[in-house]
Amino acid sequence: DARRLLNVLEQLQTAAQTAQVSSIDSDFLDNTLAQNLRRFDKGGEAFYDQISALHKSVRGSSPDAALYWLVRMLDGGADARYLSRRIVRMAWEDIGLADPRAIQLANDAAQTYERLGSPEGELALAQAVLYLAVAAKSNAGYVAYNAARAFVAREGSRDVPLHLRNAPTQLMKQLDYGKHYRYAHDEEGGFAAGEKYFPDDMPEVSFYQPTERGLEGKIAEKLAHLRELDAAARGKK
């Protein structure tokens, strides 16, 4: 489009001034374009297309493609700090609790880049991208968060149950704030089976549905067991 054409013309002008040439011939044009076409408009469509390709390569568990797009962007002059933030976002959105080490590694890579800068710090970003690409994938936390936000926006605010309220004053205690709260650490297995934590006038909602991949497989097993304990305890009442 016209914007890209203007970008190319600006690049040619800058290159000609740097090389101190008075006229642009076909050889100069070919050499300059070969060097600059791999760059991109940092705020335009090509930039976001490459970010999208990087993210989708990580999500699709393709380490080689993910590394290719990362290096393409670094080579094209992308802000490595921006890329490091996107890498952290990828870890939370597409891996999450399936492999929490990916989140830590992404954060460590971002901090390493801040400490070393380019080009040394770029290796940390590259290895973070590789790990994220091969890690177990889950967007269950991302989906749960969005579902909870939508629920709250739709249903509005509800009162905190009395037994879950803080009671720092005597008056609040007289009003039964915190009364009948069960301290989970004092319960068998560290779990207060049958206890309710949602507002009294609200049904319990299951926002988080862990996958069977990675650590989330263990989380799914534990949640299923705890729900069985809840059901058994409530059935006795």
Image (cartoon, rainbow, N blue to C red):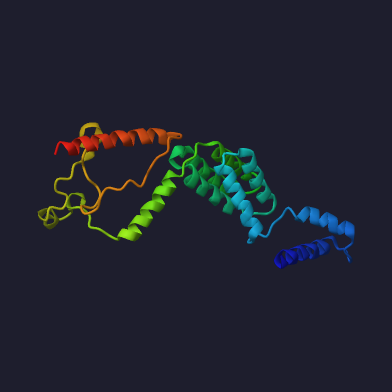
Residue at point 33% right, 57% down? 152
Residue at point 33% right, 60% down? 154
Q: Residue furthest left?
A: 174
Residue 210 in the image: state x and y as whole percent. 40, 40
Tell me the quarter of the image containing the N terminus: bottom right
Q: Tell me if I can see residue 37 in this picture.
A: yes
Residue 189 in the image: state x and y as whole percent. 25, 32
Tell me the quarter of the image containing the C terminus: top left
> How many marks on residues?
0
Q: Is residue 110 left or right of residue 7?
A: left
Quadrant in the rendering for residue 187: top left
- Of residue 88 and residue 61, the one placed in the foreground of this image is 61
- Of residue 186 and residue 116, the one placed in the foreground of this image is 186
Residue at point 15% right, 53% down? 177
Residue 10 in the image: state x and y as whole percent. 76, 65
Residue at point 64% right, 44% down? 120
Residue 21 in the image: state x and y as whole percent. 88, 63
Q: Tell me if I can see residue 80 in this picture.
A: no
Q: Is residue 82 left or right of residue 97?
A: right
